[in-house]
Amino acid sequence: MTSPAASSPSSGEKGSAFWLSFIAVVVANFLSALDMTAVSTAVPTMTSDLHGGDDFVWIGSAYGLASTAILPFSGRLADVFGRRPIMLASIVIFLVGSALAGAAQNMNWLIAARTVQGIGGGAIVNLGSIILGDLVSLAERGTYQGILILVWALAGAIGPTIAGSLAQDATWRWLFYLNLPLAGIAFALVAVFLRVKTPEGSMRDKLARVDWLGNLIIIAGTTLALLALTWGGIRFPWNSSHVLAPLIIGIVFILGFFVFESLVPIEPTTPLDVLHNRTALSGYIATFFHGIVTMSTMFYLPVYFQACFGSSPIHSSVNMLATTLICAPVSLFAGGIVKKVAKYRPTNYVGWVLMLIGFGLFTLFKYNSSTGMWAGFQIITAAGIGIIWSATVFPILASIPVHRFAAALAFQNFLRQFAQTWGITISASILQNELKKHLPQAFAAQFPQGVEIAYALIPIIPTLDEPLRTEVRVAFAASMAVVWKVMLGIAAGGFLTTFLLKEIPMHTAKDKRYGLEQPEEKLSEASSERMEKDVEA
């Protein structure tokens, strides 16, 4: 499996050049993670100030759509132009989007700014994953990948609190303006300390190597499909042409992208040989299933807390700490286990089993479940989510040459984010339909067609008289149980992928085209040679 682009195995010793480069990647990822986890808490305030109405959904969707669509393209640009220039450009784009968002005077302005932010933020996350593959071999990756996931957990823990405080005590605009100094710090760290190799060649030659048409096809297809998923069941009925037309055209474009990639480009954005073996394919399928169940959990557990317990957005974020504080440490631990035993199949197996147990237990949630029940069940599910978050990358990368890592990782990141949109959409559709069944009919009829009942209902539940208030909460718990049953079925599909995995030895080599500009082992050798000469003298 070693390719001509593979370098010799690296030693376990990491010097200052490595750690400074890794810190630069960590800070850049924290910048993107903090924004993604914080903004949702302040959405109601932004919508009210800018008179956004039903357009509130686009504050999050515009970012998610742009960050997903850019992933394959940013991976290809990183291969052609080098990791460092594209990371720096991504940070600048994110900074510009943040400044525009903070200055927004109306909802359309804010949505456009969030789109710019999404392009930069999605590329930052993608480049972080790719650069990690340049700095460490696959055999070493688990621990360092876990650290990046810890960064996301930290952002998830403090982001909503910061956003809530700013929205309540100052202004939501500072949520975006705070990104400016953070982006400046990230830019400086990457510019000064991320000393990784940049491919040689003229600008004209590099531009010719980019698969422009292929990227246009996948960006258009992704945008259309995600637009349909965002509109479906909320702005337009699922069976309307406004949803079906972009969804069908988007899927056709995405499928057409793979046909195009297999036939036309000399250097395709997504080389299809990364899908030609069952182990890598199983890893990608598992990534897709994991993206669905993860986002459903992160997005709809707070809905359960707010509807059934009357929790505020900030309080529901506190209730979610049983998930957010468990995922990352468990992911770090799982990566360390894979590194130690040099096997990834058992870890994937355990992760999916824990999720099966966890989602099965989630179906038992009631409107008045005890703290021990909802916290304990979260811990089990979160442990499974955390394990699989880090475990799916190993079967994908172990089964392909190291020079394909960037394309393979970009495609995995694309699948994960695309699946996360499906997770929100599937759960929203189920919850909407089940609430219509379980709510008292006369009460449910008060909500007009096209309104997302859950979000329209949650703010008024505390004002309802008994016994209607309890009936509504019981209906919410029963409806959420159906969501968890569907997630249980999807987790079962993920579990089945473990039986298709082969235990392939993991690479101990890295791609010699990238990595540190002056490998530290060479510095050590040069230092030793100088010492020997000094002794001889």
Image: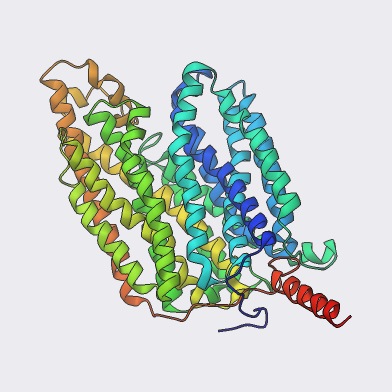
Q: Is residue 50 above or below residue 163?
A: above
| Depth order, front residue of 230/297 | 297
Res. 301 image quadrant: top left
**Position of the C terminus by quadrant:** bottom right
Q: Residue at x 70, y 54 (%)?
A: 86
Q: Residue at x 51, y 58 (%)?
A: 413
Q: Is residue 185 above or below residue 487?
A: above
Q: Residue at x 62, y 56 (%)?
A: 22
Res. 208 image quadrant: bottom right
Residue 307 shows up from this direction? yes
Residue placed furthest toward the right:
537
Residue 174: percent from left, percent from top: 59, 25
**Position of the N terminus by quadrant:** bottom right
| Depth order, front residue of 281/23 | 23
Horizontal side of 388 relative to 184 (left or right) equals left
Q: Is residue 290 above or below residue 110?
A: below
Residue 48: percent from left, percent from top: 47, 18
Horizontal side of 153 relative to 427 (left or right) equals right
